[in-house]
Amino acid sequence: MVDFTLSDSDREILSGVAEEAKASEKYARHYDAHEDEILPKAFAEAAAFPSLLERMRRRPGDDTPSVIMQMLIKIEREAHNGVPLRQAPSALGNAALGAAGTPAQQKRWGHLMLAMSITEPGAGSDTKAIQTTAVLDGDEWVLNGDKIFVTNGVRCHGTIVWATVNKAAGRGGIKSFLVLKGTPGFELVRKEKKLGIRSSDTAAYAFRDCRIPRDHLIGGDERVPQSADEGSASYKGVLKTFNITRPTVAAGGIGKALGAFRYARDHLAKEGIAVDWDKGPHDRTATEQTLLELEADIEAATLTVLRAAWLAARGEPNNLEASVAKAKGGELCRSGPQRAMELLGAMSLSHDHPVEQFLRDGRITDIYEGTGQIQRLVIARAILGYSSAELS
Amino acid sequence: MISFDVTDEQSQIRDMLVAFANNELAPRARQADEACTVPADVLDQAWSLGLVQLAIPEAYGGSGAPRSALTGALMLEAMGSGCAGLGGTAVASSLFVNPLIDLGSEAQKLRELPKFCGSTRRVATLALHESSLAFDPSRIVTRAEPDRDGWRITGVKRLVPLGEEAEDMLVLARASGAPDIAGIKAFIVPPRAEGVTIARESATIGLTPMRFARVELAGVSLPHDAILGEGRGADIRPLLASLRIGGAALAVGLARALTDFAIPYARERVAFGEPIAKKQAIAFMLADMHIECDAMRWLVWKAAAAFDRGVDVSKMAVLAQNYVNRRAIRIADDGLQIFGGHGYIRDLPLEMWLRNARMLTIHSALAAA
């Protein structure tokens, strides 16, 4: 049966998540202003709250699928202008290791925090254009190239690096390698300075004749494809992880829009401005109409995320729906906080209020994990039956 | 528990209606639009599917399926994907029947509902709109005054679907001094009663098979229990929500059908040496159309599911309607743009879809989910 309600216990989980996020709000401005600082592994306040795992462990199996709950938790957490009280022990590279690594590799490195190094100064969305090379020399791979926009790149233990073993093979020639911090030739060049999400460390790396053992090739497939048609297990493995990560990223952007919306709604209510649901559009002010439309947009984007997660929970393909969710979340992370600021007026520009940070922190959602334009390419190819070569 | 899983019964109804919409409605859409009418055999065929009497309890002669706005939304989306004008006409009687099931008193249900359970089609409707520009339900000026024998109802209702054919009619009127929506009640008005004058509207931009009519009520005398519901009459908010969800569901069906029609065209139409679908300007429009068809549908489902739980659904229905109104008209407009000049010519359905979408996204009493 179609249902969009949560059980009492799940609602309790979400209010617990909200409490925890609220307790972290006092740190938000500090880490926004001190970008050079890295978040501690755990703040003292964390002790007062169960871990996410503990919260989820108590759930009965016949309730809302846990992957849907994870999306709702993400939205609720990001709807608060805070920082994580506990740092997640894993990062994007762990997801890639889980998707494409051999069982031995997963066992060996799964406990580490692994970042993901894909983007280069000259190659962003067009990943097949990456220039970083990997050459097998005896029992070692030799990596050369530059990587940027590496999330968690400062605090991680190591990173998975995309490099090409044969540029002529395009995407098929791209393989991924594990490089641990401290490996000679692997340099952390700088920590990036960003518009928002400043408590999240973003690194730039350089690899100069960086030699890693032969068995650090993720998945272990050493074949060198001669054309792009042959594909690459590690590339496809990463694409598979998008089916969950894209809705999750979308949920983050929706959360920022929701936080900005709630702030605007609650403060406007104090000024006597609120939507009367019985009144028609001609009896609403432009401000009330904007509040209404913003809330409708948040509902719509949220539902596309839940839909993608619901398909994933059932083990059904959700590649298309994951991109739909990401496109909606990406659009909302921009238009949501923007409209909330317009509703609140000039004082919303000030750091006295969190809305301007919701805008800056949320804005990344339409960029990383595939820009809104990339999502539309993915969606258009799917509905038109085109390959990436046919529609680029 | 969050789930997008429709029941087996809902899935069967949807499949049946999608087939009906594709096979029976879509091929007749253009002709019905031009003729401003629906062939009787199509309406009879639709009636035989049992959609209107589906949720009428067995006690009143109906099929006794659970009353569900979600099922209603699925049905209307399917109908809307074939032709919103024909589909809306085929289930117009639900505009009268569903509010009776939801809000009617026992005596009213016993009196009114069995009429719709026979094998012969019975047309009924609902009158919401009025002559003023910038109309809204909270601004209704048609008045129902209590008098010795019951009620006297006076006013002019406009854009009433199938007004001339209807044998039963609900009229929304202001029944007390209570402000805004609180003062509005629904009345069961026999269209042949003394003082009722019904005439076709000049014409409308779209949904022409719904043959909209002007209904003048000149001090029409009604019995005490003409007011829908028990005693002083039912709160009409759930009725308005059902109308909002119903119209939105039809619009989602139209938008989905239009998107599915535009995709193969964009693949076939060649300009500057390649299919226009290979140009991002077109491909991204199609992607956005697809994205919004999904988003609109889930919002309609969420409002419908809330309706079925019996909670106050006013807000959720307004959100769904607002979202669908903004997106569906955009999809219809972009769809026409993809076809260029061909979209503007009446050979293809694009211009009709734009006209119909304009009706669906502004007229808020076309279908009851």
Image: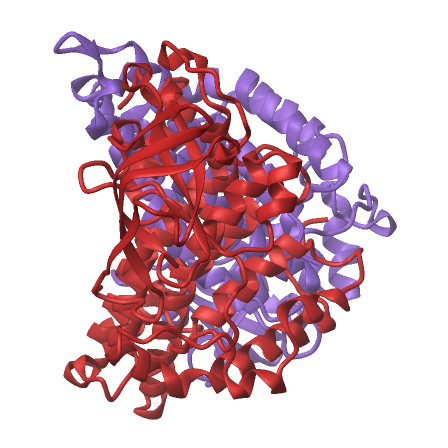
Chain colours: A red, B purple
Q: Considering depth in this image, is B146 or A53 the residue closer to the camera?
A: A53
Residue lying furthest right in this view? B59
Q: Is residue A253 above or below residue A247?
A: below
Residue lying furthest front in this view? A138
Q: Position of residue A241 (x, y in %)?
A: 51, 40
Tell me which residue sits at (50%, 45%) in the image: B297
Q: Is residue A113 left or right of residue B322?
A: right
Q: Is residue A339 above or below residue A326?
A: below
Query: Is residue B315 at all visible to an observer of this figure?
Result: no
Tell me which residue sits at (54%, 81%) in the image: A20
Quarter of the C terminus of chain A within the rendering: top left
Q: Is residue A284 left or right of residue B98?
A: left
Query: Is residue A365 at all visible to an observer of this figure?
Result: yes
Q: Considering depth in this image, is A96 or A60 the residue closer to the camera?
A: A96
Which of the 4 image quadrants contains residue A39?
bottom left
Q: How many marks?
A: 0
Q: Considering depth in this image, is A262 or B156 the residue closer to the camera?
A: A262
Tell me which residue sits at (79%, 45%) in the image: B65
Q: Position of residue A328 (x, y in %)?
A: 38, 49
Q: Is residue A62 above or below residue A261?
A: above
Q: Considering depth in this image, is A180 or A344 the residue closer to the camera?
A: A180
Q: Position of residue A47 (x, y in %)?
A: 61, 85
Q: Position of residue A152 (x, y in %)?
A: 39, 59
